[in-house]
Amino acid sequence: VQLVESGGGSVQAGASLRLSCAVSTSTAVINAMHWYRQVPGKQRELVASITTSAGYTSYADSVKGRFTISRDNAENTMYLLMNSLNADDTAVYYCNAVAIEGGLVRAYWGQGTQVTVSS
């Protein structure tokens, strides 16, 4: 399973961005997908999660109401729509997929995409 993020960039505070995560295999083998972010010197933070079958979602308190996670199983792609961005959202954003293969839980990561928000 390979994950490729895109859509990062540099924006002004208050702007919006949409991140995409393209999955190299059918999302039918993946149980859940997540967006994480990381700032240098800090631990990677879970931002949002979605189950691939039912589409249940959850969010970190810091992004609730501003970010929306979604997936398109037909296109094998996950998205993160980020509205009302602020400087605290500046980070490298990573796509993560969790699959159960042969009874084992496997986690896959993308290479990350930089989001920079200037105030």
Image: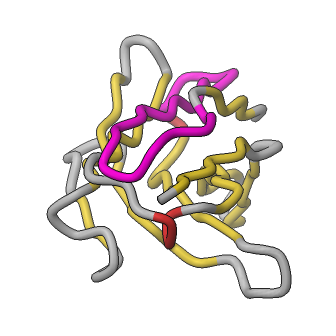
Q: Which residue is located at x 45 percent, y 68 percent? A: 47
Where residue 27 appears, x then y in whole percent?
Answer: 49, 31
Q: Which residue is located at x 58 percent, y 64 percent? A: 36
In which image quadrant can residue 43 be found? Answer: bottom right
The outermost residue toward the bottom is: 42
Q: Is residue 37 above or below residue 22?
A: below
Which span is picked out in magenta?
A: 8-28
Tell which of 104 and 40 is nearer to you.
40
Residue 28 visible to the viewer: no
Left or right: 22, with 59 as reference point = right
Name the colouring of the figure.
secondary structure
In which image quadrant can residue 49 be found? Answer: bottom left
Q: Is residue 105 above or below residue 116?
A: below
Where residue 68 appears, x then y in whole percent?
Answer: 25, 48
Left or right: 58, with 23 as reference point = left
The outermost residue toward the front is: 119
Tell which of 87 and 6 is nearer to you.
87
**Quadrant location, the N terminus:** top right
Residue 40 is a magenta residue:
no
Task: Please give the count of numbered marks on the rendered protein.
Answer: 0
Q: Which residue is located at x 37 percent, y 13 percent? A: 74
Where residue 21 appears, x then y in whole percent?
Answer: 57, 32
Residue 24 visible to the viewer: yes
